[in-house]
Image (tube, grey):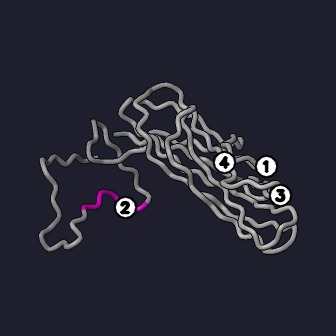
Amino acid sequence: MSTLKVSTIEPLDSDTTKTITIGSAGDTVNFAGAATGVGKLGQVVTATTSTEVTNTSTSYADIGLSATITPTATSSKIYVIASVSILGTTGGSSNQNVTTQHRILRGSTQIVNYNTSRINLSSNYGDAGNASSLTVLDSPSSTSELTFKVQQRVETANSRSSISQFNSTASTITLMEVLT
């Protein structure tokens, strides 16, 4: 094993990309000391659900999609990615839109505004599928256990419209601790 000791590494003046490559594809690069200016993931937590949950209310409700993570430092950020499979039903009305909204909460605190997804239904008793994706980089300033969850609601309710997280495709939430 060899050791290379330098104070600064810079790309060649002729390198128009100004890129420095350390290692090759498949190599592991270890940082023994404190690494700055390099993004690192501390941990990744993923949860999925295929349980069908139906909501006809304009109030937000839990859909059973949540995950828990414990940051290792108060300076850590949590990158949250959620993908919700949804199904709209008109229950007898044709040529109608069903609109759903989703949001992400940390505990009881909303951390991302809703994502609206419209489902266009063109036949009687029509069903149509769609997906809603949400992402947020949260700065919780905590080393306590944190639970993130997704809620949904129907934007405009009528007696025949409903929105479901449907069970043919799993919905997922992924939490990534970004170390700073």
Label 1 or label 2, whichever lies nearer to me, is 1
Secondary structure under badge 1?
Answer: strand
Q: Earlier in the sequence, mark 1 or mark 2?
A: 2
Amino acid type, label 1: Thr
> Residue 84's image quarter?
bottom right
How much space separates mark 3 and mark 4, taking CA atoms?
A: 17 Å
Image quadrant holding the C terminus, namely top left
Most extreme residue toward the top is 144
Per the rendered image, the range of residues in magenta is: 20-25
**Residue 102 colored in magenta in the image:** no
- Mark 3–mark 4 CB contact (< 8 Å): no
Which residue is identified by label 2? 24
- Residue annotated with mark 3: 160
Q: Position of residue 137 (x, y in %)?
A: 44, 46
Depth check, mark 1 against mark 3: the one in front is 3
- Vertical placement of residue 40 versus 27, above or below: above
- Badge 4: how crowded within 10 Å, few (<14), some, or many (20+)? many
Q: Which residue is mark 4?
A: 152
Which of label 4 and label 2 is nearer to you?
4
- From what the image shows, is residue 35 above or below residue 166? above
Q: Which residue is mark 1?
A: 54
Q: Nearer the viewer, residue 71 or 10?
A: 71
Q: Nearer the viewer, residue 52 or 91?
A: 91
Q: Earlier in the sequence, mark 2 or mark 3?
A: 2
Which residue type carries mark 4? Gln
Rounded to the nearest angstrom, the CA distance separating label 4 from label 1 is: 10 Å
Tell which of 135 and 47 is nearer to you: 135
Q: Residue at x 62, y 44 (%)?
A: 150
- Give the alpha-carbon distance from disc 1 to disc 2, as whole Å: 49 Å
Q: Amino acid at mark 3?
A: Arg
Q: Are marks 4 and 2 in contact (CB under 8 Å)?
A: no
